[in-house]
Image (cartoon, grey):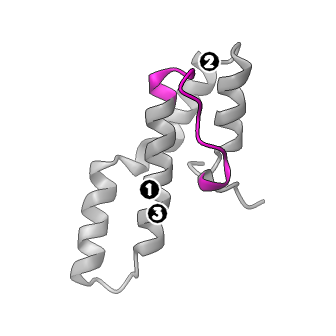
Amino acid sequence: ASPASASSASAPAATLPAAVRRWHQRVQLCEHFAGEFGGDGSARDRAVTRQMSRLRCQTLAAERVVLLRRYRHQAEVMAVLQATQSAE
């Protein structure tokens, strides 16, 4: 099944824990940059790869698992994390 796009999930409310808001913002940025990657080894591809590295895009799925465990009893947080599955 195709994972849901983070951009389709509503922006997390200010009442959510800061860690969840930061994670969600990184998901959105990583998706944006992934869409800009051309795969041709160009200077732009290298710049996109550096930016995705800085954002730690490769760690989003593992961080999501930790957040799911940490906030399992908070329905609002769980709704955001479950709606934002692109990191998996």
Spatial CA distance of label 3 from label 1 is 5 Å
Q: Residue under circle 1?
A: 30
Quarter where residue 1 is shown: bottom right
Q: Residue furthest right?
A: 1
Q: Is residue 87 above or below residue 73?
A: below
Asked if disc 3 and disc 1 are in contact, CB closer than 8 Å, the reply is yes
Q: Which mark is residue 74?
A: none
Image location of residue 45, percent across then percent down: 30, 76
* Lateral position of residue 4 relative to residue 59, left or right: right
Magenta-tinted stretch: 7-20
**Circle 1 — which element?**
helix
Q: Residue furthest top?
A: 73
Going by the numbered disc 1, the residue's amino acid type is Cys
Going by the numbered disc 2, the residue's amino acid type is Tyr
Spatial CA distance of label 2 from label 1 is 23 Å
The first of marks 2 and 3 along the sequence is 3
Image location of residue 27, percent across then percent down: 49, 48
Whether 23 is among the magenta residues is no
Residue ID at (48%, 71%): 35
Q: Residues within 10 Å of mark 2 (few under 14, many from 20)?
A: some
Spatial CA distance of label 2 from label 3 is 26 Å
Q: Residue under circle 3?
A: 32
